[in-house]
Every structure is written in C-alpha cells, then in structure tokens.
Image (cartoon, rainbow, N blue to C red):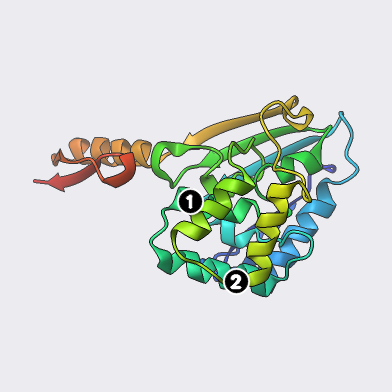
Amino acid sequence: KDKLSGLVVTRYDYAVTCQHIEIVEAAHPVPDKAGEKAAIRILDTVSNLTADDLVVCLISGGGSSLLSLPATGLALDDKQQLDRALLISGANIREMNCVRKHLSAIKGGRLAAATYPAKLVTLMISDVPDDDPDVIASGPTVPDPTTYQEALDIINRYGITEPAAAIAHLKKGITGTFTETPKLEDACFKNSQAILIATPQQSLEAAAEVARQNGITPIILGDSIEGESSQVALVH
C-alpha cells in the first residue's frame, strides 16, 4: 500500500476524501483549466514507468471533458469553442469524440502510449451506445480506429468553421504533420487490457431485478436511437 498512489478527476461538488488517492474537480460538459491541469498531472504521473509498474485506470462517461489536454499548437480556448460547437451541432457522441480524440494530447489511446511499457488495466463504465471502449471518454487508454480525415469530415458535415486553429490542426494531421492516434497494432497495447465493468443495459437489468424482488413488474418500452440499450419502465 505504501507504493499505491493515484489521481481522480470528477465533476465539481463530487470530490471525497481518500487515503491514497487524490481527487480533483473540473468542468463538464465544456472543459476548463482545472481539467487541463489534471490531465497534465496524470501524464506526468505515468511518465518514466517500467515494465514492473502497474497502472489501473477507471474510465467513465464525462471523461472527454474532465480529462482535456489540447494537442500541441492548440489552446484550451480552441477546445472549449469547438466543444460548444459540437454540442449544438446535432453530432452524436461517436462523432463528437472522434473529433475530440484528434485534437487531444491524452485521448484516443495517447494515455496508453504514455504509460508504456508499464502494464495497463482499464476498467470502463459505459454511457455510450454499443459500449464501444474507444468512444467512452474518447478512449484515452484504448486503440483508436478513427482518423484525422474522419474528424475533418465530421466538422464539415455539421458546418463548423471555427475555431480556425482546430480545423487547421485536423488538416495538418491528414497530411502527416502530426502522428495518428495509436492503433490496435501499436506496441503500447501489448501490455494493456480493457474491461467493461458496467453498462447501461446492466444497470437496467439490475433495476428490473430489484423491481421484481419488490413486487413490481418491469416491461420493455423499446429500443432507443442509435442502437442504445433498451429502456425499462417499472410498473406495479
């Protein structure tokens, strides 16, 4: 236990006191300076590790905002402006997080790259349709199947023209100026494991079982959009 240490980032007013783990607060759904500072600290924490070290990450919904670190050449204001544009654009969470990953220094598998060669275990709590690990919190510790070209296509699809710096960054990524996000075959995932420990469907099923135990019959209302887990209504 003497070697155990860690840092958790959560929303404002959600921090609690822990013995070995420090908890800091940041903004959601639009990132702020506190989240940026926390992301820098987390990268610093996992730098210079060896194959004898173990990193355990708990990743949950909201991490795209709470763990926000602009890519080289971008400012936090660029990320904030683009996040606001994405939130009102009509883009779905998969599309928004594709863009976020390609404007980030920590998301889209880049945190996994920073921990290598340490052993990395990621425990994931899903809040996204289909429970895709690379979409949850923009997948900081898992391979990213998306590309700069896809990110730019999304920006164009929704008519987003600002901030200019963010769009220019995506265009430079397409030309190879910036390295793509880590992919499945990259070495940083050789000692990495990602485990889904909770999903929306599991939560619904658990609620339904508690209802049954208390004499309430759950009924299926139907599938929600984008293939998200079925909703359950609890009725007497």
Q: Height in image: 181 above or below 67?
A: above
Q: Mark 2 sits on what residue?
A: 80
CA separation, marks 1 and 2? Answer: 16 Å
Residue 181, quarter of picture = top right
| Residue at 64% over, 35% down | 143
Classify mark 1: residues with Cα within 10 Å, few (<14), some (14-19) or many (20+): some
Labels 1 and 2: the sequence-earlier one: 2
In the rendered image, residue 184, in percent from the top left (x then y), is placed at 66, 29
Residue 128, quarter of picture = top left
In the rendered image, residue 154, in percent from the top left (x then y), is placed at 50, 54
In the image, 18: left or right of 5?
Answer: left
| Residue at 60% over, 64% down | 15
Callout 1 amino acid: Glu
Q: Mark 1 sits on what residue?
A: 95
| Residue at 73% over, 48% down | 175
Q: Height in image: 192 above or below 94?
A: above
Q: Dot 2: what SS?
A: helix
Q: Is residue 212 visible?
A: yes
Task: Assess whether mark 2 and mark 1 are in contact (beta carbons under 8 angstroms).
Answer: no
In the image, 90: left or right of 156?
Answer: left
Q: Height in image: 74 above or below 123?
A: below
In the rendered image, residue 187, in percent from the top left (x then y), is placed at 78, 28
In the rendered image, residue 223, in percent from the top left (x then y), is placed at 23, 40
Q: Which corner quadrant holds the N terminus?
A: top right
Classify mark 2: residues with Cα within 10 Å, few (<14), some (14-19) or many (20+): some
Give the label on residue 225, or none: none
